[in-house]
């Protein structure tokens, strides 16, 4: 006889307790669900717990029945019971419940979620659960919809199966029983916990402002009674459904893109019409022009009044459009998918292997199977952002390092990159396309075991280092605005503590800078771990002063990426890196490096003359390939908005060397010429940085900034631009913007600088380069492109052909091969 699998089910939600919990038992599994013993009130929780049928020994049952598994750490005695008696566990909803459970239980775990307004992967990372997930075999992530996973990191999505969830049977039994003839002239709204949770208090005030009439009833359980005739309050389920079915329609005002409350789905199932706000997950279930979509709260109010007054045509149109969406929650659709997923997740061991994301240095003396390159990258972590499931970084060096990692992985090297704990998900997402077997070494120094006080201090230190102080002030303003005075003292104390730690951190940084300037380089434990790990052959230092602690590397083949040394040309400019401490770090890094990688012949020619004292024989010049592999990817035009008819483009950061005032002045000159010629056309200058005041050269009205662009969006903006307007006087390598423009057949207007001419030689003449600062000359080139853009593209063919050959990825890859091999 085959042993029936025993599952521990960590959940307490009223809906799930009526749907997924009994369904698991109907599938033949023995399922134990614990009582909800937490003192944290939850209107969705089942409190009248009944001990389930179980084959567990009585002493084990007694231990489980008296343990609060919700929000509390799991005691060792209880962990022993879990590991001894359960084949698998299903943890629902909450990241903290999951984190505590993963620490205590070592078997198979399924994490089941139903939509959330925040990133689960971010929360799990902050709770320290990332290694608990990524180092565990047979971990499964089961979100209810593919539309909620864009905000999640790849390390969590890689363990995923999409499994919808089901409505309760009492609603299904009433399917299509709604009758407009039996309805009253009222519409349903939703707002639980209106008096005791600030988020819902704000929503309640919002509803009262826009839907004050008695013809609107507010549903939702209330922990604290609300003295308002509009509010139904906590009701028995049968009374709720009876009152609900009497509504003439339902207006869903929430706008969260990854959460959909069940009442609008329940009302659709009853057969009634539902209106919803644009941007909400409910809206995202529908086609773009669905009749139920309201484009503003005013639009929602207007159309709600139409329904309330009995507009039959609108009601019928809405009901007809809802069939495919409400199907997503019906038992005949959900249970076959659920059954298949659970059977797979609880099937053979090893079906969902751990990705081995986290790299833990170890002391080993045996020779590695393949050479390993450790890449210092944690300084770039805060600069990596995620939009619509894509990761990108505005820092050019980070994009170069991604291409270096890709080439090294293609050459057979193993890749390990450093990251602070809070950045692991974003760094992995940004770099994983470059190296499939990429591993992350966490370099964050954790607070040692010192009780809650030490943990709180560590948390405040992290907040002080990462979060702007304005965030604390905004939080205080929100508490005042919502009159949430109960939480105010704690928020004030936290704000004061963060302010103190920020001041302390600033003083510590000043002291550290003074020590560095005098030649004292800080030590870091992670560097000692690297030194002791014989598996790590090479270390790539990706910036000459961001990682000063790496000066303490020992017995490693160190390659320093040094695209430029701008202080050599901008002496005394702190903005361009001319500080004493940066120079001290740079000299130590150059002395430490076995090889120095640069991408420009010009940079290679001047580095030995700088204060860094680089040895000419150690410098290797490897030109960069095209960096934007996803330049032709799909783009959501909605985020970019309507593009101008004519715009010049320059994606870069605002640095003195970029001469962005010349960019702005050129745009202004072109517009003056267009106006003088009687043309109604206008030119817009599109940048990836904000220009104001002096740097905008009086042309602010013609400038637009779009920051944090994905690779696909960047390519889209290039292709639709009039031209690239490149005004820089100094770069660290052949400009990647010119490589991208040539690759995408975009006209190039650029400065006549050695970084371009030394690489392109005679072919640079085909670009018609303009002297630095010659804005009238830039304007002449732009005007000629306005007249005939196709001719401008054809004219630069020589530069494009040479660029495609000289900056080929294969050439770049094999240049790195010679650099990193022993």
Image (cartoon, rainbow, N blue to C red):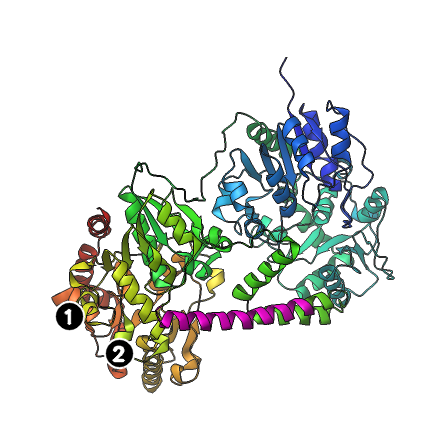
**Range of residues picked out in magenta:** 492-519
Q: Is residue 749 above or below residue 435?
A: below
In terms of depth relative to the viewer, which is nearer, 705 or 283? 705
User: Where is residue 299, by image quadrant?
Assistant: bottom right
User: Where is residue 52, by image quadrant?
Assistant: top right
Q: In this view of the protein, can residue 576 be seen by the observer?
A: yes
The residue beneath circle 1 is 765
x 31%, y 38%: residue: 368
Q: In this view of the protein, can residue 649 be seen by the observer?
A: no
Q: Position of residue 685 (x, y in %)?
A: 38, 74
Give the CA distance from mark 2 to mark 1. Answer: 15 Å
Q: Is residue 258 above or below residue 568?
A: above
Q: Position of residue 264 (x, y in %)?
A: 71, 49
**Is disc 2 placed on a helix, strand or loop?**
helix
Q: Which mark is residue 778?
A: 2
In this picture, residue 815 sits left or right of residue 359: left
Q: Position of residue 340 (x, y in %)?
A: 58, 29
**Is disc 1 placed on a helix, strand or loop?**
helix
In terms of depth relative to the viewer, which is nearer, 416 or 162? 416
Q: Earlier in the sequence, mark 2 or mark 1?
A: 1
């Amino acid at each position: 006889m085959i042993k029936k699998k025993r599952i521990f089910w960590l959940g307490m939600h009223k809906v799930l307790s009526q749907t997924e919990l009994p369904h698991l038992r109907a599938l033949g599994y023995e399922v134990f669900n614990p009582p909800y013993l937490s003192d944290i009130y939850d209107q969705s929780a089942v409190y009248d717990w009944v001990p389930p049928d179980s084959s567990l020994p009585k002493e084990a049952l007694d231990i489980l029945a008296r343990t609060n598994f919700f929000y509390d750490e799991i005691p060792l005695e209880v962990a022993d019971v879990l590991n001894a008696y359960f084949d698998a566990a299903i943890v629902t909803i909450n990241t903290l419940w999951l984190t505590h459970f993963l620490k205590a239980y070592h078997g198979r775990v399924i994490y089941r979620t139903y939509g959330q307004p925040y990133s689960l992967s971010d929360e799990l990372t902050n709770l320290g659960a990332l290694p608990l997930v990524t180092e565990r075999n047979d971990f499964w992530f089961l979100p209810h919809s593919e539309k909620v996973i864009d905000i999640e990191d790849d390390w969590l999505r890689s363990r995923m199966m999409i499994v919808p969830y089901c409505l309760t049977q009492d609603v299904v039994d009433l399917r299509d029983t709604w009758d407009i003839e039996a309805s009253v002239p009222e519409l349903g709204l939703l707002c639980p916990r209106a008096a005791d949770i600030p988020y819902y208090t704000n929503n309640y005030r919002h509803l009262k402002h826009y839907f004050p009439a008695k013809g609107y009833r507010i549903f939702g359980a209330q922990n604290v009674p609300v003295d308002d005739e509009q509010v139904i309050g906590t009701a028995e389920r049968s009374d709720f459904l009876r009152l609900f079915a009497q509504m003439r329609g339902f207006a869903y005002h929430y706008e969260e893109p990854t959460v959909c409350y069940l009442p609008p789905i329940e009302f659709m199932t009853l057969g009634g019409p539902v209106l919803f706000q644009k941007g909400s997950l409910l809206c995202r279930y529908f086609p773009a022009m669905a009749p139920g979509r309201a484009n503003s709260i005013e639009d929602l109010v207007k159309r709600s009044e139409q329904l309330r007054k009995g507009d039959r045509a609108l009601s019928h149109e809405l009901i007809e459009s809802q069939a495919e969406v409400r199907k997503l929650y019906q038992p005949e659709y959900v249970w076959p998918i659920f059954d298949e997923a659970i059977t797979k997740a609880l099937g053979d061991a090893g079906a969902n292997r751990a990705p081995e994301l986290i790299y833990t240095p170890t002391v080993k003396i045996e020779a590695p199977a393949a050479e390993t390159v450790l890449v210092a990258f944690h300084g770039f972590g805060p600069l990596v952002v995620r939009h619509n499931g894509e990761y990108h970084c505005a820092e050019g060096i980070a994009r170069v390092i991604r291409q270096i990692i890709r080439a090294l992985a293609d050459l057979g090297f193993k890749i390990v990159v450093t990251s602070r704990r809070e950045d692991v998900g974003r760094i992995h997402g940004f770099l994983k396309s470059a190296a499939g077997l990429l591993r992350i070494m966490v370099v964050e120094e954790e607070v040692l075991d010192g009780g809650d006080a030490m943990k709180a201090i560590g948390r405040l230190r992290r907040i002080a280092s990462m979060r702007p102080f304005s965030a604390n002030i905004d939080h205080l303003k929100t508490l005042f605005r919502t009159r949430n005075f109960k939480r105010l003292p704690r928020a004030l104390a936290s704000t004061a503590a963060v302010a103190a730690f920020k001041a302390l951190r600033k003083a510590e940084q000043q002291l550290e800078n003074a020590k560095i300037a005098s030649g004292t380089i800080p030590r870091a434990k992670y560097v000692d771990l690297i030194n002791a790990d014989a598996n790590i052959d090479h270390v790539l230092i990706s910036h000459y002063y961001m990682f000063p602690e790496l000066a303490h590397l020992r017995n490693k083949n160190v390659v320093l990426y040094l695209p430029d040394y701008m202080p050599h040309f901008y002496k005394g400019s702190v903005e361009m890196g001319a500080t004493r401490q940066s120079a001290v770090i740079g000299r130590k890094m150059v002395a430490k490096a076995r090889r120095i990688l640069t991408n420009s012949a010009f940079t290679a020619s001047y580095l030995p003359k700088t204060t860094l004292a680089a040895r000419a024989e150690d410098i290797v010049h490897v030109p960069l390939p095209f960096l934007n592999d996803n330049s032709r990817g799909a783009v959501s035009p909605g985020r970019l908005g309507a593009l101008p008819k004519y715009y010049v483009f320059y994606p870069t950061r605002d640095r003195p060397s970029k001469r962005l005032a010349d960019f702005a002045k050129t745009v202004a000159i072109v517009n003056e010429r267009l106006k003088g010629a009687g043309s109604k056309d206008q030119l817009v200058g599109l940048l990836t940085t904000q220009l104001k005041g002096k740097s905008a050269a009086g042309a602010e009205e013609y400038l637009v900034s779009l920051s944090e662009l994905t690779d696909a969006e960047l390519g889209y903006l290039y292709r639709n631009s009039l031209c690239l307007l490149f005004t820089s006087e100094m770069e660290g390598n052949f400009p990647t913007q010119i490589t991208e423009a040539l690759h995408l057949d975009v006209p190039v207007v650029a400065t006549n600088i050695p970084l371009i001419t030394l690489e392109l030689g005679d072919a640079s003449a085909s670009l018609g380069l303009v002297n630095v600062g010659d804005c009238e000359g830039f304007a002449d080139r732009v005007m000629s492109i306005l007249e005939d853009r196709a001719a401008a593209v054809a004219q630069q063919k020589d530069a494009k052909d040479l660029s495609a050959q000289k900056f080929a990825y294969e050439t770049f890859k094999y240049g790195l091969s010679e650099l990193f091999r022993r």
